[in-house]
Amino acid sequence: TAPRGTRQARGPVRQRFGSLADGTAVDLWTLENEGIRLRVLSYGGIVQGLEVPDRRGRWANVSLGFGNLDDYVAKSPYFGAVIGRYGNRIAGGRFTLDGTTHRLPANDGPNSLHGGDQGFDKRVWDVEPFRRGTDTGLTLRRVSPHGEMGYPGTLTVRVDYTLTARGEFRVDYEATTDRATVVNLTNHTYFNLAGEGSGTVHDHRLRIDASRYTPVDATLIPTGVLARVARSPFDFRLGKPIGEDLRQGHEQILLGQGYDHNFVLDKGITAQPRKAVTVTEPTSGRVMTIATTEPGLQFYSGNFLDGTLKGTSGRVYRQGDGFCLETQHFPDSPNRPEFPTTVLRPGQVYRSSTVHSFGTL
């Protein structure tokens, strides 16, 4: 990869982005470090912009989003947001823990998606800037009260967004609870390494170090099977263009209207982030690698972008104009004891870390 750029740590700088209907102020924070500029909203912890240079040193925003707060509130498909309490789907909007059944909002057909209709993506977070040596970043905090969106326990959450001098965008999650609950936090940034609003991502070359994935039913809930990716459109182990097998007619592709599936990472759960994903965009030469502590990765190929949303560039987003790579535990784990557990109990600390590294070919 090419050497890092010459942009040194700057910020974080705060400015007003808008106000919610109840008058709550929403801030936009801008920070910059070696080769990356990041813009974050206090609303939803949203990554509103992520700029990196191409092989010729030309900068572009590689994350999809909106230029105004009203669009984020009214119609965002989770662009850039912190997702909680539970990233992904929980079947039937319910789970049982220690003999008690908890009911959640059904906001995705019969299922509960991304923590419910008023999840962490729609809350205003407390934000504090920090500088640690050559790193710069933001600490986001929120206390989710017992019973919020049906989840038990008061959950105290911290999310750190860090830009390092190595050209990394790092996300660290931490949470504690006062009674048994489930938690699965992630970030829902949509990427287009050619630049937001530039068109399809189908020519991006994606590699996922996963030999298995979790097939889904008609409502996109895992069946419980850990299926092999070999000889299927889900085999990204050697890397291939995102669009290469999208029109194969595979049953799982039809169910998701594209890729919207959890990949079982070969590395499993790790104490420190380990590399599991590489994405390359051939025209710009931009390369993004993802390392994570998590056992799963939801790869979503932007299937439901339908031409009704206008992004920060002023251009319309159509199907396949962005992709998500959400590091996570598996969907519906609270109802699947055979999956890695997402239960958090008092005295335990939930921790999860994901590192996005950027460079060029």
Image (cartoon, rainbow, N blue to C red):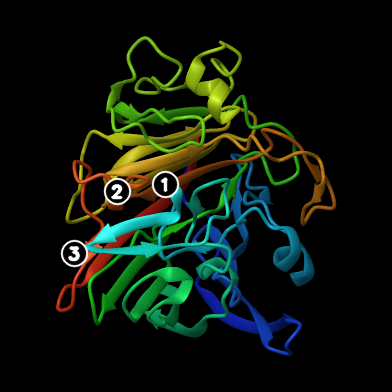
Residue 89 visible: no
Q: Is the residue 332 above or below the residue 23 in the image? A: above
Instruction: Name the side, left or right, on which 308 lies relative to 138.
Output: right
Name the residue beneath numbered marker 3: 98
Residue 66: quarter of image: bottom right
Name the residue beneath numbered marker 2: 335
| SS at circle 1 | helix
Residue 236 visible: yes
Name the residue beneath numbered marker 1: 91
| Mark 2 neighbour class, 10 Å CA radius: few under 14, some 14 to 19, many 20 or more | some
The answer for how far apart the CA atoms under marks 3 and 1 are is: 18 Å
Residue 39: quarter of image: bottom right
Residue 67 picture location, percent across and down = 77, 64
The amino acid pointed to by label 2 is Asn
Query: What residue is drawn where x is 45% and y is 76%?
Result: 148
Query: What residue is drawn where x is 48% and y is 36%?
Result: 220
Q: Say which label, 1 or 2, has the lower sequence index.
A: 1
Q: Say which label, 2 or 3, has the lower sequence index.
A: 3
The amino acid pointed to by label 3 is Asp
Looking at the picture, tell me which residue is in the foreground, 267 or 358: 267
Instruction: Name the side, left or right, on which 222 lies relative to 361.
Output: left
Which residue is outermost to the bottom? 23
| Mark 1 neighbour class, 10 Å CA radius: few under 14, some 14 to 19, many 20 or more | many
Looking at the picture, tell me which residue is in the foreground, 278 or 319: 319
The amino acid pointed to by label 1 is Ala
The answer for how far apart the CA atoms under marks 1 and 2 are is: 8 Å
Instruction: Name the side, left or right, on which 184 lies relative to 299.
Output: left
Q: Is the residue 47 above or below the residue 349 in the image? A: above
